[in-house]
Image (cartoon, grey):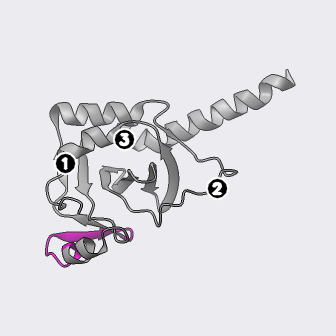
Amino acid sequence: MKSLLFPLTIVFLFAGCQESVFQSLKKTDDLYVYEGLPHPGRENPSFEKERKREDIRQIKGHWFYEPKVKASGEIRDRLMNLLFVEHSFSVPDPKVPPKDCGPFHPDYAIAWSSDDEENYLMICYTCGEAKLIREGKTVTYEVYSNLQEVLSEFQSKRPPKQ
């Protein structure tokens, strides 16, 4: 019996985590996507140039192009399906050293409102991480789904990498 307790605890922990992470998505029909600016470290000249544009917005310390774009139709459905896949996200193992790819820099942010509050899932392709920002808290996840394919549909302003 004791041998089953640990695996069941882990399963419930991750299942509860996944449920609580995206529970607020079930309360909205509208998803929006923000395209992130070039990387401030690896693409600094481009980042500095883009940051001076008029159509830029800072969200929780990260820079994005305005306006946000509403995800609709088949793209919205594909995005929602990826967000709800059980094994798409996991909490990083605290025993594993952090990735050495520089400070977190989101390539995209998915935004939605629930209970009169704006929620953000910021996704970085370089390190394969996502940060969920909701209710004044930030939680980091490792990303295992191919969100990049769907989110690339929203690339319109970021200049090509040099």
Residue 55 magenta: yes
Camera sees residue 28: no
Residue under label 2, please give it.
Answer: 97
Residue under label 3, please give it.
Answer: 25
> Tag 3: Cα neighbours inside 10 Å, few (<14), some, or many (≥20)?
some
Q: CA distance from mark 2 to mark 3?
A: 31 Å
Residue under label 1, please give it.
Answer: 154
Is residue 26 toward the left or the right of residue 128 in the image? left
Foreground of the two, 132 or 50: 50
Image height of 111 relative to 60, above or below: above
Is residue 15 toward the left or the right of residue 85 in the image? right
Please report contact status of discs 1 and 2: CB closer than 8 Å, yes or no: no
> Which range of residues does the magenta coloring cover?
50-61
**Residue depicted at x 52% and y 53%:** 140
Mark closer to the chain start, 1 or 3: 3
Q: Amino acid at mark 2?
A: Pro
Q: Secondary structure at mark 1?
A: helix
